[in-house]
Amino acid sequence: MRTQVVIIGSGPSGLLLGCLLSNAGIDNIIIDRVGKDYILGRVRAGVLEEGTVDLLRQAGADERMHLEGLPHDGFSLAFDNRDHRIDLFALTGKRVMVYGQTELTRDLMARREAIGGTTIYEASDVSPQGFDSAAPFVTYRKDGITRRIDCDFIAGCDGYHGVSRKAVPEKSIATFERTYPFGWLGILADVPPVSHELIYANHPRGFALCSMRSQTRSRYYIQCPLDEKVENWSDDRFYDELRLRLPAAHAQALVTGPSFEKSIAPLRSFVAEPMRFGSLFLVGDAAHIVPPTGAKGLNLAASDVHYLFEGLRGHYLDRSQAALDRYSERALRRVWKSVRFSWSMTTLMHRFPDGGEFGQKIQEAELDYLTHSEAAATSLAENYVGLPY
Ligand code: FAS
Ligand code: PHB
């Protein structure tokens, strides 16, 4: 088998890249180790930057998002039993779209099927090879047979635990990492959200986030110790703890109901440099991870796809290598600014075991600055809505 671009990974970055390439007439095959249902069963991101929304338009997969998504002009920082709204639209002229990653992934899968894109699911032993030569290829096993796809380029869209980054010789890649001494315990429940916008709460008991997937489906998170176990948290215990971390008005208004998803996610900041190795390109979580506090993970995957698609389109349609040669440099410049923002939001909003009274005072001073200085609020807002590509 031969194609122009093999995409390893059928998550948001792989699917988005595949749709953009197909729309441009560039042949590609997506290959994933799991099936569609497994991918759609993962509960992840919920906030899209305008750049991500526009890429979905370019991919031809934005119709349902505009029907069911929730455009948000702002969000609130809650502390000292009060809400402080950050008016994103007034400060930046931009807004964000609240639309679950699961639905975005479903829309991209539907678009890919509609345009007849080839996706190979449940493939094992996927291996990118020859990417330091002029003849790259990918091998995999399916139905007990080892198969090979020859190609021009390989897009490693296979996430943090994928095979692409690990296929790069250790001497050729540098990694940068920070882990955080806590996780997020999150639930999904079909109950109306406690507020029409997101609430990020800084509380002595720990961070909490009130988000949503629709007007009838809420997504709530509370900071928890790294060694916490989901089975220790009944719905009642979760809601009681969430109430304690919210301003009283929200705690009283909280509508509770049975959760249908409950999980703990660890938090880390991670970046691999560079993001290109010959004809292998790392995209999205394969190259970087951010703590979800800044709602950047999925949106960074989208901007990587933007830069790589520009490069591949230049190569195939304009016979120019310029954008492809600049992929890693352009992507990393935006990655590191989003990594910084996600780290700063995480540092601002969470209780750190070793933070001490000085750390607490610094958080209070920064929250006071952010909620009383237009310049500070504008800086926060322009990072949250997404820095330019
Ligand atoms: P993904 O991990 O989504 O997709 C990678 C794909 O590659 C998967 O389908 C996988 O099956 C496949 N794959 C892996 N190894 C393979 C192999 N060897 N062979 C073939 N295929 C392979 N971001 C936010 O913005 N907000 C959030 O609230 C948020 N919450 C998150 C919660 C959790 C638990 C996690 C893990 C991430 C969260 N993220 C969040 C980040 C998340 O949304 C990612 O940024 C996003 O999924 C990135 O998309 P991809 O790069 O496509 O990687
Ligand atoms: C979510 O809705 O899952 C969500 C929203 C904003 C974040 C993190 C997660 O910063």
Image: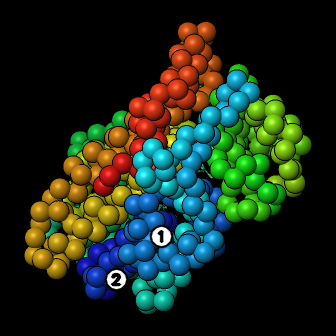
- The structure residue drawn at horizontal position 34% and vertical position 82%, both measured from the top left corner, is 22
Few, some or many residues within 10 Å of mark 2 (<14, 14–19, 20+): some
Mark 1 sits near ligand 1, with its Cβ under 8 Å away: yes
Residue 22 circle label: 2
Task: Give the quadrant of the C terminus.
Answer: bottom left
Circle 2 sits in a helix, a strand or a loop, which is it?
helix
Is the distance from the Cβ of mark 2 to the nearest ligand 1 atom less than 8 Å? no
Frontmost residue, 209 versus 152: 209
- In the picture, measured across the screen, residue 156 lies left or right of residue 87, that is left
Three-letter amino acid code at the position of disc 1: Ser
Up/down of 51 relative to 238, above or below: below
| Residue under the point 25% across and 79% down | 4
Residue 374 place in picture, x, y as percent: 45, 32
Picture disc at residue 298:
none
Examine the rendered structure and indicate whether residue 214 appears above or below residue 250. Answer: below
Question: Which residue type carries mark 2?
Answer: Ser
Quadrant in which the N terminus appears: bottom left
- Name the side, left or right, on which 248 lies relative to 350: right
| Residue 69 position by quadrant | bottom right
Which numbered mark, 2 or 1, is in the foreground of this view? 2
Q: Residue at x 48, y 70 (%)?
A: 10
The tag earlier along the polypeptide, 2 or 1, is 1
The Cα–Cα distance between marks 2 and 1, rounded to whole angstroms, is: 15 Å
Q: Which mark is residue 10?
A: 1
Q: Which residue corresponds to the image point at 44% horizontal and 60% vertical from the top-left?
A: 50
> Mark 1 Cα within 10 Å, few/some/many (few <14, many 20+)?
many
Disc 1, SS: loop
Q: Toward the viewer: 193 or 275?
A: 193
